[in-house]
Image (spheres, rainbow, N blue to C red):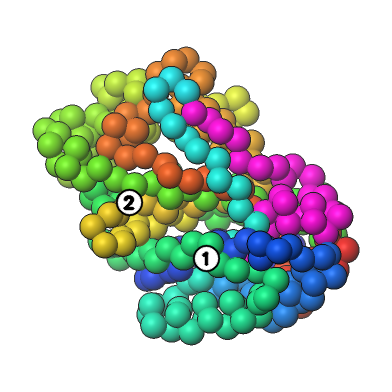
Amino acid sequence: MQFQPGILDGVPAVARYVHFVLRPEGADAGAIRAALQRLSPLADGSDVVVGLGPSLVAALGAEVPGLHEFPDFSGHGVKVPSTPGTLWCWLRGDDLGELLHVTRKVQKALAPVFVARQVLDGFRHAARDGGHGHDLTGFEDGTENPEGDAAVAAAFTQGAGAGLDGGSFVAVQQWVHDMDAFEALEDEARDHHIGRRLADNEELDDAPESAHVKRTAQESFEPEAFVLRRSMPWMAGLQAGLQFVAFGRSLQAFEQQMRRMAGQDDGITDALFRISRPVNGAYYWCPPLKDGRLDLRALGL
């Protein structure tokens, strides 16, 4: 099974998230295929991870079982918008300047069929040796990520056949933090919003049911809802937040977690919504690799 290795690697020092859409005047399937073939040599799956949206797969007359558009999970006083995407590139590296040059190469490969709709720069924050990066609130992100074989099992499709095995489904959301609201909380209230103690990252047994950790405890679902998180903070001008990225062998685990966060299971909404809000949300399918290039057999390429 050959998967895009950047998915399994830890978060890089810096990253770019580039969302592409088809040009407004449209493009036929032949032009789309040609653009993807030009992209393939650049998409090594390590420095450039690629995801294809449901509408793009459909435009090629193909189907990836289990891939569908991001639902609108809004309700119970919270908004969880759906903003379907066409093609997503996660550019990973150590230097933003270098990522600019990679962005330009990708952009030229996809032109004139695709145009960039959004570019967001992310960075690893306050990472300790051997540890995960931290959210801008100071809390560690991805504490409960599966590791080793468990991470592979959670993130990648297996047993579905050639062209599908090694693929991964990804949920992408941009969250905007209300740092004033977070900073106004007392220490205990901050800890109870997340369900962990900021000082030592220990999970709190007495956290309320609205605590983020309790809302998303992966082993508490039936079936269990394990995903591989690769989220990173972002900052643009005076706004900042978290670019949430979660990979899975299917979209089921993410949807189980998101429904509970939004209060659809029991009417209790995640306390995270009091200090942050999602402004977009999309699903993509990340194809496996074959001979170091994107394996697009499932799309007829």
- At numbered mark 1, what does the secondary structure look like: helix, strand or loop? strand
- The rendered magenta stretch, by its main secondary structure, is classed as loop
Look at label 2 and name its amino acid. Gly
Residue in the picture at 55% in, 46% down = 83
Residue in the picture at 43% in, 20% down = 76
- Residue 296 picture quarter: bottom right
Q: Looking at the image, can residue 82 be seen? A: yes
Q: Quadrant of the N terminus?
A: bottom right
**Residue 73 lies within the magenta run:** yes
Residue numbers of the magenta segment: 49-74
Q: Position of 81 compared to 4: left or right?
A: left
Q: Looking at the image, can residue 133 be seen? A: no
Tag 2 near tag 1, CB within 8 Å: no
Q: Which mark is residue 135?
A: none
In this picture, is 43 found above or below 74? Answer: below
Across and down, in percent, residue 240 comes to 29, 54
Q: CA distance from mark 2 to mark 1?
A: 17 Å
Look at label 1 and name its amino acid. Val
Q: Which mark is residue 18?
A: 1
Across and down, in percent, residue 20 comes to 59, 64
Relative to the observer, which residue lies in front, 39 or 293? 39
* Residue at image mark 2: 241
Which numbered disc, 2 or 1, marks the residue that appears first in the sequence?
1
Residue in the picture at 44% in, 32% down = 79
The 10 Å Cα crowd at callout 1, few under 14, some 14 to 19, many 20 or more, is many
- At numbered mark 2, what does the secondary structure look like: helix, strand or loop? strand
In this picture, is 277 found above or below 145? Answer: above
